[in-house]
Amino acid sequence: MANGANVITIKDIAKELGVSINTVSRALNNKPDVSPITRDRILESANRLGYVPNTLARSLVAGETCTIGLICSDLVNPFYARIAQGVEETARSNGYTTIIASTNEDDITERQAVDLMRSKRVDGIVISPTQQSHDHISRLLQDHIPFILVNRHVEEFQTAYVINNNQHGAYLAVQHLVSLGHKHITHITGPLRISSVKERINGYRQALQEKDIPFDPNLVIHSDLTLECGYKTTLKLMKTKTPPSAIFAYSDHLAIGAIKAIRELGLSIPGDISLAGYDDIEYAQFLDIPLTTVRQPMYEIGQRAFNHLIEIIQLNDLNPKKHQEILEPELIIRESTGRVTGKISHFPYTENPA
């Protein structure tokens, strides 16, 4: 049945089922004008015969490479790894290969990654931008390259994106801390250029203002978004003259760094200080003191980002407003937060924690 050196082609599948080659091709490419029954028969036959798509031929005929690019800010962070999994698995189930690059929050590396994806002629790109500059994002728009942003969005111009409702998520976390009696709450966060950083600060302020707690900008501490920065920032913070009774960290990654610092100082969580994170990465619940955090649907963000991107690609739909989605977060209360107990004052302090 096979031609050549036992290579199965769509002609073999069409011959076996008595359908046209075009029908087989459209079914294998998940086109909408093939009936579910026919598609299932074709897919079953393709699997049984061991059909492997000729992606080179497909790209030459259709002008597509059946590949997408995925550019992540930090694949070391389990948050981005889970989003990447959502993108890659959904792409694979739809017949697409994913080329993945990690920028480590570096703008030059991000620019190089965008150029790489374009040189590979990917059909579209999923990007979690560093937001240090927007020139390369702007060029993608100008050149009509299909792309979608995840976790962050660019305020200066309209793009497709799938993000989390950051302001509401931060509001939920700080509202919880306030309900436990905390008024002196420090927010450890990232660089202000990042859209989600600004949105979570807004949620932090909203929860305080709702209970008439004055907003103190000195309690918002900006750092890089690494474990080490979470550790070093908290170590300095807890040695100040007036250490907080609670910390709300921008991410679980920062919160885990904060845990190390708190323990090194001989303090207990939540006895001496309450701690809340953001993301609900997989091992947040498996820490010695399970972490109260705001759950983002990480896998779903990646999954939905690909689904939007494939619509943009296949329908040539470059209207970004049709592909902007905000997913809702959920507060997950665990053992790292408790009622306020008193003031920590037994450490030598410095005046500036930054």
Image: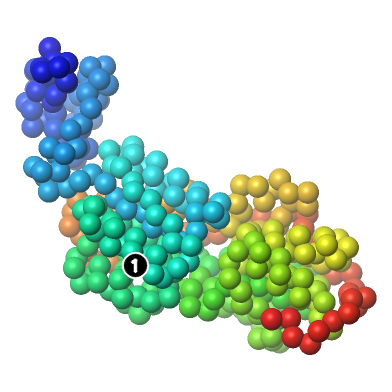
Left or right side of 115 for 4? left
Identify the element where label 1 is drawn: helix
Where 270 sits versus 65, above or below? below
- Image quadrant holding the N terminus, namely top left
Residue nearer the viewer, 232 or 338:
232
Q: How many labels, in total?
A: 1
Residue 164 image offset from top left, x and y in percent: 49, 62
- Image-quadrant location for residue 162: bottom left
Where 14 sits versus 252, above or below? above
Left or right side of 2 for 137? right
Residue 91 image offset from top left, x and y in percent: 33, 43
Residue 72 image offset from top left, x and y in percent: 43, 58
Question: Which amino acid type corresponds to the residue marked 1 in the rendered image?
Answer: Arg
Where 11 sits versus 310, above or below? above
| Residue sitting at x 10%, y 43% | 60
The residue singled out by tag 1 in the image is 111
